[in-house]
Image (cartoon, rainbow, N blue to C red):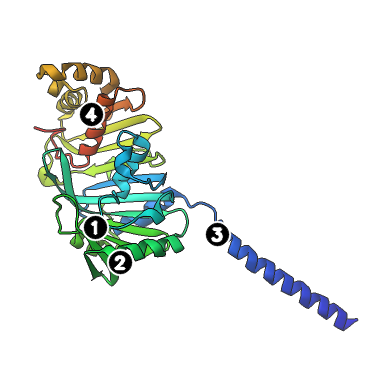
């Protein structure tokens, strides 16, 4: 009797252990999606404290060719946070279609390059996927190793260096897989080294502390958002600017410096409504279309808000509105070009 009970108990325990182990495997493969907001808080301390701009995007898939998506804001805007993977001599096919939980792009020291309004900056994009990349990550890394111009050790990590297609703040663009679910794309080796060292040392200081007033102007649950804090030495009319994009609604907020709110409203209106280009007769129709699309106002807190819909606009209007958001990442304190 005792031996029969002992045998049944042993078999039951063994079945329970097998069930528990199997359940563990299932939960690892099909774990509950992590919260992007908690990931933001986890990653924020990684960025060097002199980082000026932060762009975030959540819940999107890695596109096949980002340049083919120009005009498709659902693809184009997240790429501001993840960085482009096109234009380099490696195959990023293993990542295509993979769901990204969160991408954060930190930048500093921006400067204009070329003649088409592009800019370069020291920075790094951190891309966290919803699931571990597994074999896809190993294949992506093999592709990097096979075609990289150089392979370096930076802060103890193997980093793959590629020549960019345009002038940058550094000779290379740098790629690496940081963790099973995380990859990095950096535009400056010094910035990348600082970021990796901060990951290892877990410093207390943050580039964008909770006390920063810009946080109050955005909703971090939106799909894409941006915060820019303008260095004190370059602040003129504003201290910073933010924007957020939810569905087809964009909202830009300027934080005036001192008593400059009325001047900020005037310059923001002239910039976004296209009145800065209205002196050119050929641009007058576009300016009129922009004025119909854009709404500018001065709020009770002295902040200037610009809002518009991205859908339903003619293509040229959408292009100018996108350029406004794109260039606000390097806003230098005057609200648009001087």
Q: Residue furthest right?
A: 1
Q: How many marks?
A: 4
Question: Disc 1 to disc 3, how far (Cα)?
Answer: 33 Å
- Would you place residue 200 above or below residue 273 in this image? below
Residue labelled with disc 2 = 145
Residue labelled with disc 3 = 29
Residue labelled with disc 1 = 48
- Would you place residue 60 above or below residue 183 in this image? above
User: Is residue 279 shown left or right of residue 324?
Assistant: left
The quadrant of the image that shows the N terminus is bottom right
Residue 38 x/y as whole percent: 43, 52
Mark in front: 1 vs 3: 3
Question: Disc 2 to disc 1, how far (Cα)?
Answer: 28 Å
Circle nearer the N terminus (1, 4): 1
Q: Are marks 4 and 3 in contact (CB under 8 Å)?
A: no
- Would you place residue 188 above or below residue 325 in this image? below
Residue 320: give its label: 4
């Amino acid at each position: 009797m005792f031996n029969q009970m002992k045998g049944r108990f042993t078999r039951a325990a063994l079945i329970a252990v097998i069930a528990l182990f199997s359940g563990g495997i299932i939960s690892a493969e099909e774990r509950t999606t992590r919260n992007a907001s908690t990931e933001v808080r986890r990653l924020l301390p990684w960025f060097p404290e002199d980082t000026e701009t932060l762009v975030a995007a959540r819940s999107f898939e890695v596109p096949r060719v980002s340049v083919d998506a120009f005009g498709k804001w659902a693809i184009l805007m997240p790429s501001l946070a993840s960085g482009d993977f096109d234009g380099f001599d490696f195959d990023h096919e293993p990542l295509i279609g993979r769901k990204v939980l969160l991408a954060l792009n930190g930048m500093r020291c921006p400067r204009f390059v070329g003649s088409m309004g592009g800019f370069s900056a020291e920075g790094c994009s951190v891309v966290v996927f919803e699931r571990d990349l597994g074999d896809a990550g190993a294949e992506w890394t093999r592709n990097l190793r096979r075609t990289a111009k150089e392979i370096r050790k930076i802060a103890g990590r193997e980093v793959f260096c590629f020549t960019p297609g345009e002038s940058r703040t550094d000779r290379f663009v740098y790629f690496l897989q940081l963790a099973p679910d995380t990859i990095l794309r950096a535009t400056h080796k010094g910035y990348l080294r600082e970021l990796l060292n901060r990951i290892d040392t877990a410093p207390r200081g943050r580039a964008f502390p909770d006390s920063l007033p810009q946080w109050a102007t955005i909703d971090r649950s939106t799909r894409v958002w941006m915060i820019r804090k303008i260095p004190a030495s370059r602040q003129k009319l504003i201290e910073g600017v933010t924007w957020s994009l939810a569905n087809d609604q964009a909202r830009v907020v300027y934080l005036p410096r001192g008593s400059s709110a009325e001047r900020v409203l005037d310059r923001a209106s002239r910039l976004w409504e296209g009145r800065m280009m209205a002196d050119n007769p050929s641009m007058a129709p576009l300016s009129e279309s922009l004025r119909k699309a854009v709404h500018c106002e001065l709020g009770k807190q002295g902040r200037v808000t610009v809002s518009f819909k991205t859908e339903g606009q003619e293509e040229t209007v959408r292009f100018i509105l996108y350029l406004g958001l794109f260039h606000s990442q390097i806003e230098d304190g005057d609200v648009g070009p001087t």
